[in-house]
Amino acid sequence: AQSVAQPEDQVNVAEGNPLTVKCTYSVSGNPYLFWYVQYPNRGLQFLLKYITGDNLVKGSYGFEAEFNKSQTSFHLKKPSALVSDSALYFCAVRDRDTGRRALTFGSGTRLQVQP
Amino acid sequence: SAVISQKPSRDICQRGTSLTIQCQVDSQVTMMFWYRQQPGQSLTLIATANQGSEATYESGFVIDKFPISRPNLTFSTLTVSNMSPEDSSIYLCSVVPGQGMEGYTFGSGTRLTVV
């Protein structure tokens, strides 16, 4: 079985400060990992993914994430937060060593960036 | 990446009735997924729909309640049958372009309210 944990329901950060949104995963094989963002009344937007290779992945809007196999983590980061980054963020996983193609999502973390 | 047109964007329905949600993709895709997102919660997979075969349902979801059609490689429908207020959710479709190593693409969602 595959699962994702996002331990923080909400993260508050001041504009201009660095932000981190945490994600840990569990798969029986090796993971494909994804981050998505959801703005109010809108669908899910893809931010970035880890497939293989470099553990540091850069994505849209200045976001990046670091894959850490020993800690089974894939935390989302941004060096300088913007008020417009305020949204709901989801981490998702797929086990690449099984036939299951669907993503499993974490519970989501609401990011609030204060001006 | 694939572009998905999902309809309707929202609806308010009477309990006991049914609603059919449509997803049209601008390219041929092998797999389509249907998710449910209850208010303030994560995405839960309802079923995986392959063209030419019966959909595969996740635990807790049954075909009689959520019948799915997949008549070709660019289109799918999900019906929410005999609705109750507990079915009030956002329903999203998703596709896996190519080998799935691009970001999975999501429809904009259907916000369903059952009264």
Image (cartoon, coloured by chain):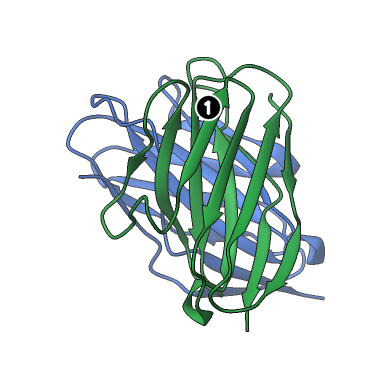
Chain colours: A blue, B green
Residue, far bottom: B115
Q: Position of residue A101 (x, y in %)?
A: 37, 30
Residue A112 vertical placement versus A81 (above, below) = below
Which corner quadrant of the image does residue A57 belong to?
A: top right
For the residue carrying disc 1, how many other residues have a C-alpha within 10 Å: few (<14), some (14-19), or many (20+)? Answer: many
**Which chain is mark 1 on?**
B
Q: Nearer the viewer, residue B30 or A114?
A: B30
Please give the name of the residue rendered at 81% of the width and 62% of the height, measured from the top-left corner. Answer: A84
Q: Is residue A40 visible?
A: no
The image quadrant where one finds the N terminus of chain B is top right
Identify which amino acid the numbered label 1 is placed on.
Answer: Val
Q: Compared with residue A100, is residue A111 higher up or lower down, i.e. above or below?
A: below
Up the image or down, B20 lies above or below B16; here it is above
Who's the residue at 58% across and 20% down the image? Answer: B73
Q: Position of residue B88 (x, y in %)?
A: 56, 73
Nearest the camera: A32 or B31?
Answer: B31
Drawn side of residue B1 relative to residue A65, left or right: right
Q: Which residue is disc 1 drawn over?
A: B96
- Disc 1 element: loop
Q: Is residue A22 left or right of residue A36?
A: left
Image x and y of residue A82, in percent: 78, 61
Quadrant of the image containing the C terminus of chain B: bottom right
Residue A33 versus residue B90 in the image, above or below? above
Residue A46 at x, y percent in the picture: 63, 40
Whether residue B4 is visible, yes or no, is: yes
Closer to the camera in the image, A79 or B98: B98
Q: Residue at x 33, y 54 (%)?
A: B62
